[in-house]
Image (tube, coloured by chain):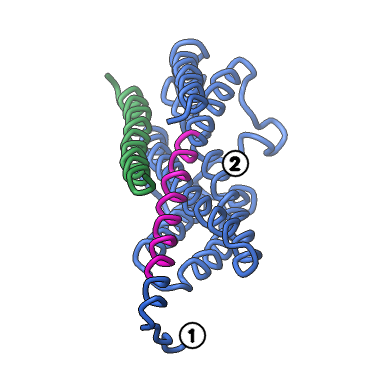
Amino acid sequence: MKLWRWLWLAATLGVLAEGFRVALFVVPPDSAQGDVQRIFYYHIPSWAGMGLFFAINLGCSLVYLAVRNRDQVLALKADALAVTSAEVGVVFCLIGLVTGSLWGRAVWGIWWTWDARLTSTLVLWLIYVAYLLLRRFAAGPQMRTLAAVMAIFGYVDVPIVYMSTRWWRTQHPGPVFGGAPGSGIDPSMMPAVWWNLAGWLMWGIFVASLRYVAEYRTQKAEQDEALRLLDAQHELGGVTPVAGR
Amino acid sequence: MDMGHRHLALAYGITILIHLIYVTYVAVRYRRAKKLAA
């Protein structure tokens, strides 16, 4: 692992440790919910991470579709970053669902309800799990193109999730940030939000950078191996056209 | 420990656990890819 990654990891762990300390021992408890409200400081960064990485997945999928016939190297990089960001986004989304469920059980008395925010988020998670399964199990040259198209359609659910608490008033509370007048949290609680937001996003970037290198190297090695086999076939004069291509 | 504190501990614990599981998977993929490229 390169030096900058070790330095980034050290900084990330420092920020996360400070975020943990501030969230649990520094900021005051919520006047209505008590200490269980501190789940918020891990819940919100998960959604921020999910939003960031699914947006990267969308961007990379668009780039892949735009350049796949013109620039093979850029297309390969965009595709590797697309699968990487989808994976990291799915992890953040899963954590958001689990921490939300635990919080809901403590505050509402229920683990789950089919309200607009929860249902649209579960659908979003399932869409990206399906995207990863498609990439894992589908074979053939069209797999990457299909996955990129699926990612674009899948992203449509992201603004629906974001707007769900504004469009429909169901079980989930309204938006804390950028919501109705009087929404938001007390300024004394904001340090816990900022430290954990920064820490978990830095962590996501660190993991994604490692996963990207792994994915790109694997895809490059597979591509090189396929080209080597094709060259060997040419040399033997045994090339046969593939049906339907 | 009351239910609120138990759920708070679970939420933080599960968050860290899921991230640790995923980063372990990524580390395995990274090492495998490094060997493949070598």
Query: Residue at the location (34% across, 49% down)?
Result: B36
Dot 2 or dot 1: first in sequence order is 2
Chain identifier of the residue bearing label 1 in the image: A
Pick out the residue farthest to the left: B1
Query: Residue at the location (43% across, 43% down)?
Result: A211
Please name which of the two marks, 2 or 1, marks the residue nearer to the observer.
1
Q: Colour of chain A?
A: blue
Amino acid residing under circle 1: Arg
- Decide: few, some or many residues near mark 2? Use Cα within 10 Å; few <14, some 14-19, many ≥20: some
- Count of numbered circles on the image: 2
**Can you identify the residue that label 2 sits on?**
A174
- Decide: few, some or many residues near mark 1? Use Cα within 10 Å; few <14, some 14-19, many ≥20: few
Which image quarter: residue B30?
top left
Towards the viewer: A168 or B10: B10
Element type at mark 1: loop
Amino acid residing under circle 2: Gly
Element type at mark 2: loop
Q: Is residue A226 on the magenta stretch?
A: yes
Towards the viewer: A80 or A102: A80
Kindly indicate which chain is depicted in green in the rendered structure: B
Which image quarter: residue B34?
top left
Q: Quadrant of the N terminus of chain A?
A: top left
Chain identifier of the residue bearing label 2 in the image: A
Query: Residue at the location (34% across, 66% down)?
Result: A137
Query: Residue at the location (45% across, 37% down)?
Result: A207
Q: Is residue A90 left or right of residue B2?
A: right
Place of residue A37 in the rendered image (x, y in percent of width and height, measured from the top left): 46, 26
Q: Main secondary structure of the magenta part?
A: helix
**Can you identify the residue that label 1 sits on?**
A245
